[in-house]
Image (tube, rainbow, N blue to C red):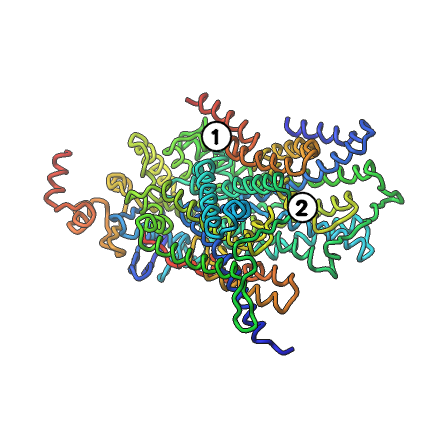
Amino acid sequence: MSAILRVTDLRKSYSGIHALDGVSFDVEAGSITGLIGPNGSGKSTAIDCISGFQKLGGGKVVLGDADITGRPAHLIARAGLMRTFQTVRVYDRLSLADNLAIAAQQFDPATWIDEFLRTRRYRQAVEASEKRARQLVELIGLQRYYEAETGILSYGQKKLVALAAALMPHPKIVVLDEPVAGVNPSRIREIEVALQQLNQAGETFLIVEHNVQFITTLCHRVIVLEQGRKLTEGTAAEIHTDARVLEAYLGMTPEMAEAEMRGAA
Amino acid sequence: MTIDAVYILQLTLNGLALGLLYALIAVGLSLIFGVMEIINFAHGELLMLGAYAMTFALPVVGLLYWPALAAAILLVMLAGLLVYEILLARLRPDEFERSILITLGLSIILIHTVQYFFTATPRIVDTQYGFDGVEIGNIRITLTRLIGAAAALVAFAGLYSTLRFTQFGRAMRAIAQNREAALMVGIRPRVVARNAMVLAAGLCGLGGAALAPIQLVTPYMGQFLIFKAFALVTIGGLGNIPGAVVAAVVLGLLESVIGGFFASAWQEGSVFVVMIVALLLRPEGLFKRGGMRVG
Amino acid sequence: MKLAAALAAAAVFAVLPLLTSSNYVIGIGISALVFTTAAAALNLVYGFTGLLSFAQLGFWGIGGYAAALTVVGLGGSFWSGVVLAGVICGTIALVVGYPMLRTNRHAFVIATLTFALLATLIARDWVSLTRGPLGIPDLPAPEAFGRRFDTPRQFYWIAWAFAMAAIAFLFALCSSRIGRTLVAIKQNEPLVRAQGISPMPYKLAAFALSAAITGAAGGVYCFNLRIIDPTFLDFYYMQTFLIIVIIGGAGSFWGVIGAGIALSALPEALRFSEDLRMIIYGVILVVAMFVMPSGVAGWLRERRLARMREALR
C-alpha cells in the first residue's frame, strides 16, 4: 500500500502558542486512519490546516502526487480531499438530492454553457451524479427523505448526509471531523457499519474523534496527538495499551486500563 | 495662493468640533455593534430627537442651557431604552441583515413622524448665551460651540472611565471581546445590551442637543451624519471603539480642511472615498486586532 | 403551476392597455413592471446570495443617468441608452464589487450604502456631467421602426417587453445550477468551499448581473418620467425595492414577483399624504420583519414544512 496523504512537519501557532509543533503522519490508501488526542492537542487545527480552512505556519501536505500545501480550501477539495465539519454543515433549505448534487457539481465537466444548451455532456453529468446520489442515500438509509429538505432531519441524520455529500465526487480521501459527536448512541453503530462498507468498497478515511471506542473498532491505524506534537502512532491494539497514551489521553495507568478491560469482559 | 495661518487654525478648530460630533455618534454605533453585532440604522434619528427635544425644552426652562441639555439627553436615553426593549431585544446576535431592515424601518417612521407633526421647516433655537463668544486673536468662537465641544470631551472621559472601571463597563468589554466566554462567567447579555443601547443613545442625545443651538434643526439632520458615521465605524473596524474615535476625529479634520480649499462636493465625498481606499487596503477595517483565539 | 400562473399574469399585463383607457392606471402599470424587475434583481443578490446590497440604488441612478446622457449628450437612441446603462452598471459592479465582497458581510452592507451615497453626491455635485440639481429635462420619446412611443400607453409596451425579458432571464438563472449554488453560498459558505466551489466568482457574477438589470431598469424608468435629476436617487426607491423583496419573501422568485405587482399599487393608493405614506412604509417594514421575516412565500413554506414533518413522524 502507498500513502495517499502525506503530512510532513505541520506547524501552526497563534500569538506565540504552538497549536501544532511539527506533526508528521501518512494515511495509507484504502485505510481508515484515526487521529485522536485530548482537548487542545491540535487535532482540529491539523485538519483545518490540511484542508485549507486555516493558514498553516509551516510544513508540507501532499495528496497523491500533488503538493496541496497552503492552497485555498476549494482547490484542495478539487484535488480530491473532501471533509466534513465538527458541527454538522448541510444546506438546510435545499433537498437532500440538491445537497448531494451540489457536492458533485464542481467535479463534472459540464459548464454553465452546457447547462444552458442542455448538451449531452450536461445530461450525462446530471445522470451520473443522480446515480451516485441514489446509491449513497441507500447506503445511509435515508431513501424516503430523498426529495425532502434536509432541515427536517435529525442531527444524526444530517451527519450522515454530510458524509454522503463528502463521498459524492469519488474523492481520494475523506476527512471526517468528529463524525459521531452529538449523535444518538443508538445511531453510532449505523455510522460504523456505513463507514466499514464504504472502506471495503475502496474509500480512504481520516477520522478525528473523541469517542475512543469508535476509533478503536474502526481504524486500522491511530495517530495520537498531544500538545501539538505526535505522541505515538500504531494499530488500535497498540494504542490501547500504550502507557503514554493512557496517561495523556485517558488519565489512567496501564493497570487501571487492564482492570477496566477485565471488568468489561 | 498664500495660506493664511488664521484660516488654517479656524479650519482646524472647525474640524475638531466636527470630529467630536462624528465621534459621539460613531462611538455609540461601535458600542452597539460590539455588544449586539447589529447596526442601528435609526441612530441618526436619535440624534435628531435630541435636537428637537432641546429645541422644545429651551423655551420651557427660560432658555437655560444646562437644564434643557439634561432633559434632552434623558429623553433620548429613554427612547433608546424603548427601542431596545420593543425591537432589538427580540433579535439574535447573528441576525445582522434583519437588524438593519428593522432599524431602517424605524428610521423612516421617526423622520416622517417628526416631519408630519413639526413640518420640514428648519428651526432655529436661542439659548441664554445667545451669540456670546470668545475671541482668540482674529478668531471668534461662539460659547455654544465651545460648550458643545467641552461637553463631548467630558462625555468621552465619562465613557472611558465607565468602560474601564465599572462592573457594567467590564461586562460590556467582555461581551464585545468574547461572547461565549462572557456568557460562561455569568454575564447576562440582555442587560449588557440594554445598557449599551441606553449609553449610546445618551451620547447621541448629547450630540443632538449640543448641535441644536449651532445648526438648523430639521428632520433629516441625523441622516446626513449617520451615513458618514457608518463609514467611520467601518474604517475604524466595526466594534472597535478607539478605532472609531480616531477615525472620527481624523476625518472631521480632513473634511474641514478639504472644505476650506476645494468645492463642497469633495468635502462631502472625502469620507466615502477614504473608506473605499481603507477597505481596499484592510478589508477588516484599519484598527481591527489581528490574531485568533486558540480553540 | 407557478409558471402557468406567471404566464397568465404576463398575458394580463400584455393586454392591460386594451382593458383601460385611463392613463393613470397605465402609469401605475409601468411603475409596477419596472419596480418588480428591479426588486427581482435585488432578490438575486439579497434573497438568493444573502448579500444585503444598498448599491442597487446607486446602479438605478447611474443607469438612469447613463441612458439619459447617451440620448441627450451623445445623440444615441433610447435603446442603445438602456443597453449602455446595463453594460456600464455591470462593469462598475465588477470593479467595486470585488473589494466590497472581500470584506465581511457587515462591512459589505455599509460599503454598498456608501456607494449609493457617492452616486447621489455625483448626481448633485458633478454639474458639468449631470447638470446638478436642475437635472436633464425633456428626454425624447423612444423611437423604433419609424414609430414614436410618445404616450404612456405606447411606452407601456416598452416597459412590458423589458420586464418580461429581464424576469425571464432572472428566472432561467435562478432555477439553474448557478442559482442553486448561490442559495448554497447563502446558507453555508464554508461547506461550499469544502465542496470545491469558490464563492467569489458566483457572488461577483450575481452582484454584477443584478447591477446591470437594475441599471437598465433605471434607464427605462427615467424615460417614463421624461426627466432625470438627483431625486431619481432618492432613498425612497431603495425602500420600495426592499419592501417588495421582504414582503414577497427573500429568496422566493415568484413571491417577490407577486409582491412587486401587488405593492406597486400601494404608494398610489396612499397618495393622500407623503409623510403618512412613508410612515406606513416604515411600519410595514418593521412589522413584516417581526411577523413574517421570510415574507409571504416564507410563511407558506413554513406551513408546508410543518405538514411534511407531521407526515414523516
Residue B115 placed where, x, y %?
Answer: 62, 42
The answer to whether residue B85 is visible is yes
Quick check: do tags 2 and 1 share a chain?
no
Which residue is found at the position 85% from the left and 45% from the top?
Answer: C144
Numbered marks: total? 2
Which residue is found at the position 35% from the left and 61% from the top?
Answer: A59
- Which residue type carries mark 1? Tyr
Residue A36 placed where, x, y %?
Answer: 27, 47
- Comparing marks 2 and 1, which lies closer to the viewer? 2
Q: CA distance from mark 2 to mark 1?
A: 37 Å
Q: Secondary structure at mark 1?
A: loop
Report the side of C60 relative to C226 (left or right): left
Report the side of A229 relative to B144 (left or right): left
Neighbours of disc 2 within 10 Å: few (<14), some (14-19), many (20+): many
Q: Which quarter of the figure has residue C269?
A: top right
Q: Quadrant of the N terminus of chain B?
A: bottom right
The answer to whether residue A115 is visible is no
- Which residue type carries mark 2? Thr
Return the mark for residue C214. Answer: 2
Q: Which quarter of the figure has residue A67?
A: bottom left
Q: Which quarter of the figure has residue B291?
A: bottom left
Neighbours of disc 1 within 10 Å: few (<14), some (14-19), many (20+): some
Most foreground residue, B102 or B85: B85
Residue B136 placed where, x, y %?
Answer: 52, 71
Q: Which residue is mark 1?
A: A146
Chain letter of the residue beneath label 2 in the structure image: C
The reply to whether the C-beta atoms of the residues labelled 2 and 1 are less than 8 Å apart is no
Q: Secondary structure at mark 2?
A: helix
Report the side of C85 relative to C292 (left or right): right
